[in-house]
Image: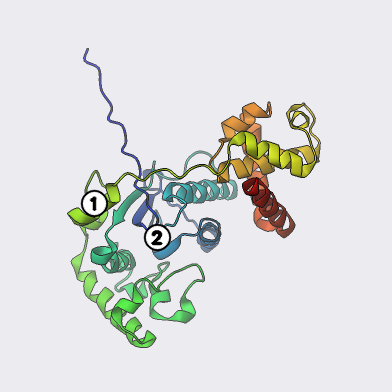
């Protein structure tokens, strides 16, 4: 019998400033929101991600069974942004609605676009999603998109960035918003856009040859600021403990917090994985993963812990 050869997935394209059309669908077309509260929680996680990773959300549509976004990244790759968002929302959704298992259909789709040619069209396309689905007669009548924020600053979410698009439609704010509204209304007649949904280069890019050449140019990886060994030693020194104290069977709260701080910073600085730290500290991987989730949740809420982690990070990078 002939062997079936599976083609490896091409790696995600990443460069600072890249803008992506992101599409995320529910598993088997199922709903990913069951209430207004679900969508509000999703938005709180989107906002937290913007603050944590520094990317910009240029447009969005929260449809019942899928999500569309235009996202501009900085240094943190889109994969990190989306993994954090989908993991945390799935955990919330499963807990609230008493279910288990994945919520989303496989990997999200992401097409890096040439902003000079396609950004305005992409934002308009996302805003017209409710029109194409038959849920609204106009983009302005659609719910759960960024269109309202583009039409009126009073409706603009703090984590939405409209400044990449609106100035293209006029120098005066009100005039630009009116011109943008007419542009989107006119674009509704286009219907489905295969180019915006499928791209090229295996669905990874959309642009001319010059843009593709730039996007596909290999990026020299940045040197790691520290090694995992250096990170562990510097944090242990700062915390006044020996590494051996973190590897014994003790469940002391202070040691656990230090382990989680080290794990968090190792992953943030990309010098160690959860598996690496579980082996190093002689801990069960599942337990480490659960504790790291608790730690990150606490970090989002505890300002004192945030200050402490920032201090540790400065000490690690200062050497």
- Label located before the other in sequence (1 or 2): 2
The x, y position of residue 271, in whole percent, is 55, 38
Task: Say which residue label 2 marks.
Answer: 72
The x, y position of residue 172, in whole percent, is 36, 87
**Between 208 and 156, which is closer to the camera in this rendering?**
208
Q: Alpha carbon of mark 1 to alpha carbon of mark 2: how far?
A: 17 Å
Identify the secondary structure beneath mark 2: strand
Task: Say which residue label 1 marks.
Answer: 212
State whether residue 271 is above or below residue 142.
above
Which image quarter holds the N terminus? top left
The x, y position of residue 197, in whole percent, is 26, 54
Task: Say few, some or many: other residues with alpha carbon within 10 Å of mark 1 (under 14 / 14 to 19 / 20 or more).
Answer: some
Residue at image coords 57%, 31%: 275
Residue at image coords 40%, 55%: 16
State whether residue 238 is above or below residue 54.
above
Task: Say few, some or many: other residues with alpha carbon within 10 Å of mark 2 (under 14 / 14 to 19 / 20 or more).
Answer: many
**222 relative to 291 in the view: left or right:** left
> Does the image show residue 204?
no
């Amino acid at each position: 019998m002939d062997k079936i050869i599976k083609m490896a997935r091409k790696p995600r394209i990443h460069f600072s400033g890249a803008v992506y059309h992101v599409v995320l669908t529910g598993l088997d077309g199922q709903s990913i929101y069951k209430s207004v509260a679900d969508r509000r929680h999703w938005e709180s996680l989107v906002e937290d991600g913007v603050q944590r990773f520094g990317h910009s959300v240029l447009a969005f549509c929260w449809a019942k069974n899928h999500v569309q976004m235009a996202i501009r990244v900085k240094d943190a790759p889109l994969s990190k942004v989306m993994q954090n968002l989908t993991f945390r929302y799935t955990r919330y959704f499963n807990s609230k609605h008493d279910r288990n298992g994945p919520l989303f259909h496989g990997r999200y789709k992401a097409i890096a676009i040439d902003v000079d040619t396609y950004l305005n069209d992409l934002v308009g396309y996302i805003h017209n999603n409710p029109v194409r689905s038959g849920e609204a007669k106009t983009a302005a009548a659609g719910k759960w998109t960024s269109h309202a924020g583009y039409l009126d600053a009073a409706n603009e979410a703090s984590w939405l960035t409209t400044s990449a698009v609106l100035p293209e439609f006029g120098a005066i704010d009100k005039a630009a918003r009116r011109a943008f509204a007419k542009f989107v209304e006119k674009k509704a007649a286009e219907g489905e856009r295969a180019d915006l949904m499928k791209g090229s280069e295996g669905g990874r890019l959309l642009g001319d040859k010059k843009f593709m050449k730039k996007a596909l140019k290999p990026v020299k990886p940045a040197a790691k600021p520290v090694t995992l060994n250096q990170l562990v030693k510097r944090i242990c020194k700062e915390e006044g403990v020996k590494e051996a104290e973190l590897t014994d069977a003790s469940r002391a709260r202070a040691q656990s917090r230090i382990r989680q701080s080290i794990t968090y910073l190792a992953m943030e600085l990309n010098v160690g994985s959860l598996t690496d730290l579980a082996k190093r500290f002689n801990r069960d991987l599942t337990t480490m993963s659960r504790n790291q989730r608790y730690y990150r949740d606490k970090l989002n809420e505890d300002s004192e812990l945030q200050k402490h982690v920032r201090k540790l990070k400065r000490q690690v990078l200062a050497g």
